[in-house]
Amino acid sequence: MKSFKDAVNEQMRQDPKARAVEGEELRRLQELLLEMYLEVQKACDDNGWRCMLLGGSTLGAVRHQGFIPWDDDLDLAMPRADYEAFKGRFHELLGEKYILNAPNYEGRPTNRFPKILKKGTVFVEKGTPEDDRCCVKIDIFVLDNCPDGKLRRWLKGLRCTALMFAGGHVLCWEDWKRAGGPQTMRERIGRLLSFRGSEYWFDRFDRVCRWKDEGSRDLCIPSGRKHYFGEILPREVFLPMSRGTFGGHSVNLPGKPDPYLRNLYGNYMEIPPEDKREKHYIEKAEF
């Protein structure tokens, strides 16, 4: 059975109006993303906050020592305590050039995880209504402590998964109302749950994910691609951080990249065929 991401990729490839970011445009985007990352990392280093590359960016550092050649985004991770401190001083440190769009922060969150948006840029993904949050962005995934007890872990994971499901489907319904187009099962489910806006569900998701026990055996990434139960790993897989190279710069990575990447991608050193490469399909981009 195809994953939702695979189904979306296939649908976008078949849409004559959609285009992938490629060639010179991709090179310029990657340069901008790297510039953004270095500024965010400096702010974190200056204040003692732990921040590391995650997801495909970790894979790029390990396999390519930089961006995966076709990659058009950049992912970071922060432990919960460091992220909350970073969020509290974001305006002071980075607000002149960037916007933080995040649950339980200013304005309306547009996803279950925080995003750092570059002011003065435009990046409109296919099927997304254009507004002032359609910018070049970096994604942040929060590392949360995970309950050691099986029952508590199961109950927390179930709540997080349900809230994420609700928020994602309601957001699809809200976007459909603004942009129109074919209606799928996601929009129909979102309509049923839209007695609360997507921002309510994302804020609730973010609060429920938190767990105060800093000595817990495992950490998890509830907002990650495999969701709560799919990204529970021993604490030492993430912390303390290790070092790697990305685009000629020394960067922070999870403490043990191999088990992290194997959990996420399986045989991560194998280059996937072109039709399996994850890309964003866009309508408009201005850097």
Image (cartoon, grey):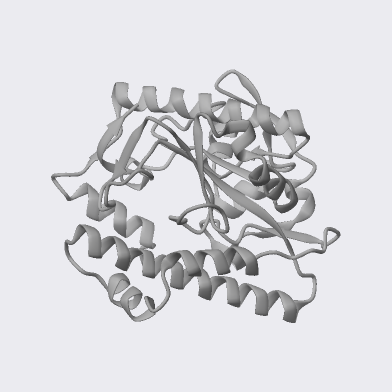
252 to the left or right of 222: right
Residue furthest right in the image = 215
Q: Which one is nearer the viewer's eye here, 238 or 138?
A: 138
- The location of residue 106, given as percent across then percent down, is 53, 52
Image quarter of the N terminus? bottom left
- In the shown orientation, is residue 140 left or right of residue 276? right
Q: Nearer the viewer, residue 248 or 265?
A: 248
Q: Tell me: 189 left or right of 160.
A: left
The residue lying at 41 percent from left, 69 percent from top is: 197
Return the x and y of residue 115 as percentages of the image width and height: 50, 45
Which quadrant holds residue 21?
Answer: top left
Q: How many marks?
A: 0
Name, please, the residue furthest toward the top: 248
**On the rendered image, what quadrant is the C terminus found in?**
top left
Q: Quadrant of residue 43?
A: top right
Query: Which residue is located at x 57 percent, y 58 percent?
Result: 104
Quarter of image, res 227: bottom right
281 relative to 152, above or below: above
At 43% from the left and 27% from the top, the residue drawn is 30
Q: Where is residue 42 in the image (x, y as percent from the top left)?
A: 67, 27
